[in-house]
Image (spheres, helix red, strand yellow):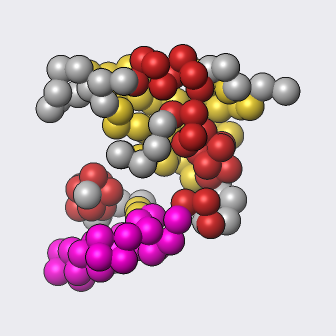
């Protein structure tokens, strides 16, 4: 749903928003929202993120998908070299980041959640697996 809001806000801009949703029912809802809101800049892909070909996106966002450690391989495959990942994370975000840093390096900024004082939005850049 956050991607639909971004597409609405960017409708008059040269920005394409692609949503990846593996659940067919949710993808159908998003497709209906795209049609009803006339969002030609919004694309829906009904598949798992692991099956999406490598790309070089400027921004990738994820909400309620996986732990930071499990997201990083997909984020690294999908982001441009100067790209940013924006992750909406719950109360256990600190532990997730600590585990992720065992195998990965990344720059991180933390922003407070507007809906839960224990949740945050993480902005990750320069994601690289340790060798």
Q: Residue at x 23, y 80 (%)?
A: 32
Looking at this view, name the residue that lies furthest to the right: 131
Q: Residue 39: horizontal and vertical position, in percent?
A: 28, 74
Q: Does 22 lie within the magenta span?
A: yes
Q: Residue at x 38, y 70 (%)?
A: 23
The range drawn in magenta is 20-48
Q: Is residue 123 above or below residue 52?
A: above
Q: Is residue 122 above or below residue 24?
A: above
Q: Residue at x 65, y 43 (%)?
A: 73
Question: Front-most of 50 and 55?
Answer: 50
Relative side of 78 to 115, left or right: right
Question: Front-most of 7 and 78?
Answer: 78
Relative side of 62 to 104, left or right: left
Q: Residue 18: horizontal and vertical position, in percent?
A: 44, 65
Residue 10 in sight from this viewpoint: no
Label count reads 0
Residue 19 in sight from this viewpoint: yes
Q: Residue 123: horizontal and vertical position, in percent?
A: 45, 30
Q: Is residue 4 above or below residue 115?
A: below
Q: Is residue 116 above or below residue 78?
A: above
**Split into 4 quadrants, where in the image is the C terminus?**
top right
Q: Residue 82: horizontal and vertical position, in percent?
A: 62, 37
**Split into 4 quadrants, where in the image is the N terminus?**
bottom left
Q: Residue at x 67, y 50 (%)?
A: 77
Q: Does 37 lie within the magenta span?
A: yes
Relative side of 43 to 114, left or right: right
């Amino acid at each position: 749903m956050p991607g639909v809001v971004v597409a609405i806000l960017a409708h008059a801009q040269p920005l394409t928003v692609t949503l990846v949703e593996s659940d067919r029912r949710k993808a159908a809802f998003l497709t209906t929202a795209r049609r009803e809101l006339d969002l030609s800049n919004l694309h829906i892909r009904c598949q798992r993120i692991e099956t999406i070909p490598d790309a070089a996106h400027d921004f990738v966002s994820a909400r309620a998908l996986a732990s930071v450690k499990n997201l990083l391989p997909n984020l690294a495959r999908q982001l441009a070299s100067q790209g940013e990942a924006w992750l909406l994370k719950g109360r256990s975000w600190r532990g997730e980041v600590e585990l992720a840093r065992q195998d990965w390096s990344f720059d991180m900024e933390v922003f407070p959640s507007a809906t839960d004082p224990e949740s945050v939005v993480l902005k990750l850049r320069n994601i690289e697996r340790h060798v």
